[in-house]
């Protein structure tokens, strides 16, 4: 494989700066290349296990734009650790618009890469922007209602009620100008947290740097179940790769299968006998990334 160059980049989303890394093949000079736009899942940042994917794609001849959402990681935005579906979808569209303007990028061959929470985001973005060339979604969260019922199943009604109450209090407080009420993104089973399956905390921490902030504003919790990317599946026209972990305890596999079935465009479905966080590392990474690379080569390089 050839080498790559990584440069700092930044773009505005609704007046706030999102920061990114832009990767391009080392041999790339005047020719425009396909570009893969990437961002992480719930509370994740660009330096939390996504660099190996971006590097593989860049070494294979693609440009890559890997960004942090507003309020998270290296990007601007106050309050910190705020996760808003509306804002993150705006960030995706702003990132795509920025990528299309980069001189190294072929603007008609911009694709999306998402994982977990952003696996739903990339599908919604593609459903709304029919100029997207393709997208890949690994262990995707395609239905907030199904995911919330899954939390009820593994954490219990009391735990769900407690974090929901904190979420309502945080939403009310935000309207009164108060500081956010935070809850952990991941915690051990039985503790308060957005994800408390047995594999959530150790799995997420295997991906994150020491600087990662294990918090999110609780106001997302009460509205999480209303975010249902599956409802927009029928509007997707571009080629899609859906990668499902059969033993996923965080993003229910059934919702991903149902989403793939509902899509109108050409969709490829891959399944893996592993848990939600296993796909990012070791054999899981090697298999998932190679499947993604084969997909992107086929649908982007030959167009």
Image (tube, grey):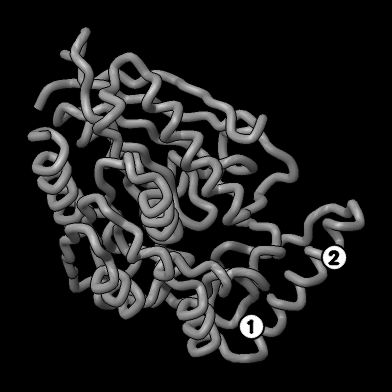
What label does residue 79 carry, if any? none
Quadrant of residue 57 within the rendered picture: top left
Q: Establish if 22 lies above or below 31.
A: below
| Mark 2 or 1, closer to the camera | 2
First in sequence: mark 2 vs mark 1: 1
Rendering coords of residue 173 (x, y %): 86, 61
| Residue at image coords 46%, 29% | 20
**What residue did someone put label 2 on?**
172
| Residue at image coords 33%, 14% | 103
Q: Establish if 66 lies above or below 105.
A: below
Residue 206 visible in rendering: no
Mark 1 neighbour class, 10 Å CA radius: few under 14, some 14 to 19, many 20 or more: many
Task: Determine the secondary structure under disc 1.
Answer: helix
Q: Which of 132 and 288 is in front in this view?
A: 132
| Residue at image coords 29%, 22% | 105
The quadrant of the picture occupied by the N terminus is top left
Q: Which residue lies furthest to the top in this view?
A: 30
**What residue did someone put label 1 on?**
160
């Amino acid at each position: 494989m050839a080498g790559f160059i990584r440069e700092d980049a930044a773009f505005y989303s609704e007046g706030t700066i999102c920061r990114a890394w832009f990767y391009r093949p080392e041999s790339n000079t005047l020719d425009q290349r396909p570009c893969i736009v990437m961002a992480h899942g719930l509370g994740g940042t660009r330096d939390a296990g996504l660099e190996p994917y971006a590097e593989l794609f860049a070494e294979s001849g693609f440009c890559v734009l890997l960004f942090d959402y507003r309020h998270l990681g290296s990007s601007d935005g106050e309050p910190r650790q705020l996760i808003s579906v509306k804002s993150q979808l705006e960030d995706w569209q702003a990132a795509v618009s920025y990528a299309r303007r980069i001189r190294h990028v072929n603007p008609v061959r911009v694709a999306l890469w998402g994982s977990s929470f952003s696996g739903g985001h990339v599908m919604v973005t593609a459903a709304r922007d029919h100029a997207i060339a393709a997208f890949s979604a690994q262990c995707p969260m395609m239905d907030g209602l199904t995911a919330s019922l899954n939390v009820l199943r593994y954490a219990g009604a009391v735990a769900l009620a407690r974090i929901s109450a904190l979420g309502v209090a945080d939403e009310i407080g935000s309207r009164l100008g108060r500081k956010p009420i935070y809850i952990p993104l991941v915690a051990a089973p039985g503790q308060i947290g957005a994800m408390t399956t047995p594999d959530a905390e150790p799995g997420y921490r295997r991906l994150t740097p020491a600087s990662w902030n294990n918090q999110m504003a609780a106001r997302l919790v009460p509205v999480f179940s209303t975010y249902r990317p599956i409802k927009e599946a029928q509007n997707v026209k571009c080629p899609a790769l859906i990668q499902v972990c059969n033993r996923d305890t965080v993003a229910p596999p059934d919702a991903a299968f149902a989403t793939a079935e509902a899509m109108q465009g050409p969709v490829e479905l891959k399944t893996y006998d592993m848990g939600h966080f296993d796909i990012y590392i070791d054999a899981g990474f090697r298999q998932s990334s190679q499947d993604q690379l084969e997909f992107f080569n086929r649908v982007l390089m030959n167009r």
